[in-house]
Amino acid sequence: MSRKRRLAFFGSPAWAVPVLEALAREHDVALVVTQPDKPRGRGLETQPSPVAARAEELGLAVAKPRRLRKDPEIAGQLCALGLDAAVVAAYGQIIPEALLQIPRYGFLNIHPSLLPKYRGAAPVNWALINGESETGVSIMRLDAGMDTGPVFIQERTAIAPDETAVELSERLRDRGVELLLDVLERLETARPEPQEGEASYAPLLEKEDGRVRWSDPARKVYARHRGVQPWPGSWFEHRGKRVKVLEMKPAKGAGAPGEVLEVGSEGVRVATGESAVELITVQPEGKRPMPATAWARGHAVATGAPLGGG
C-alpha cells in the first residue's frame, strides 16, 4: 500500500498539469502554487495558468504570489500545512532558500536532462539543437543553486530521429512522473547523491535561436528545427519578410547554402552547408500556414534562387 504524502505543488504551464493530476490521485496536495493570472489570447483577457485552472477543477487550494521572495504570506502558508515535501514542475520562479527548508523532506523537482548536463530552463530544446543522441530525466532535491541539488534517480533514453522538443519533453515528463512517485514512496530511506560530471547550461531560448542557418549541415538545420518547437520556431527572412518553417525534413542535394534546388510537388528543396533540407509547410509573415511549394510559386521563388536566413 502506498504512503500518502502531504504535498505542495509548484507549477504553471500545461506541461506541468499531468504531474499535478498524478500527485492529486496518489497523495494529499494541500496547496498549489502557480504564476499569477495573465492576459492571454486575442482578446487579452486575464486567465489563470493551466495549472491553476486544473487545480481549481480538482478542488485544490491555490496561491498565486507575484514574487515568492517578496511575498510575506507564502512562508506562513507553507509552514502551517505540515508538509512532507513540495514538488516543482516548471513553476517559473526561483524558490527562495528560506522556503526550501519548510517541508520535512524538502523540494523535489522533475528535470528533463541527465544532470549536471543542461541545467537551466530549456534542457530539452538545447539537447536537440546540439544534436544529442540521448538524454534523460532526473528527480532531484532543490538547493539554492540553479539545478545543482543532489539527484535521487535518473534514467537515460535515446532521442528518436524525428522527435521534436514538444514530443520529447512530454515523454520525459511522463516517465519523470513515474520516477517521482517512486521516490515519494520511499522518502524516509531515499538518499540523493551529489551530481557528478561536467555541468552545462540550457538558457531560455531567444527569437534569434530559431533562425535557419543555411550554412550549417542539413543534420544540424533539422536538429535546430526540432529543438526550437513550439517557440520560437524555425524561420528565415526572404525579401525582407519573415517566413516560418512549420515542417521540414532532411533531403539529398548540394549547392550554395540557401540555394533553392527544386520547387517540387511535395516541397521546396534547399541546399545547406552539407546536403539539403526540404521545406514542406511554411507560414509567411501575416499569412496563414501553406504548402511551401505554394509559397514559392506565389513569390516567384525559382530553382537557383537564394533564400535569406544566414
Image: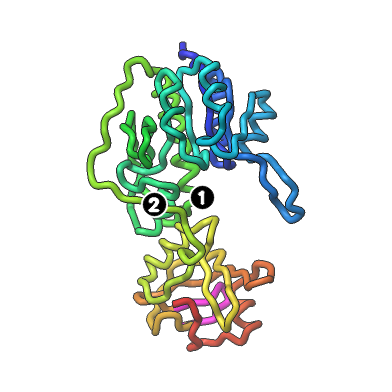
Give the image location of residue 171, x and y in percent: 47, 42
Give the image location of residue 160, x and y in percent: 40, 51
- Residue that numbered label 2 is attached to: 202
Q: Residue at x 33, y 53 (%)?
A: 133
Give the image location of residue 45, x and y in percent: 75, 48
**Camera-nearest label, 2 or 1:** 2
| Residue kind at label 2, given as amino acid type | Ala
Q: Residue at x 71, y 52 (%)?
A: 41
Q: Residue at x 55, y 39 (%)?
A: 67
Q: Is residue 73 magenta?
A: no
Up/down of 282 relative to 128, above or below: below
Which stretch appears magenta? 261-270
Q: Nearest the camera: 259 or 108?
A: 108
Q: Nearest the camera: 220 or 293?
A: 220
Indicate the quadrant containing the C terminus: top left, top right, bottom left or bottom right: bottom left
- Residue that numbered label 1 is attached to: 166
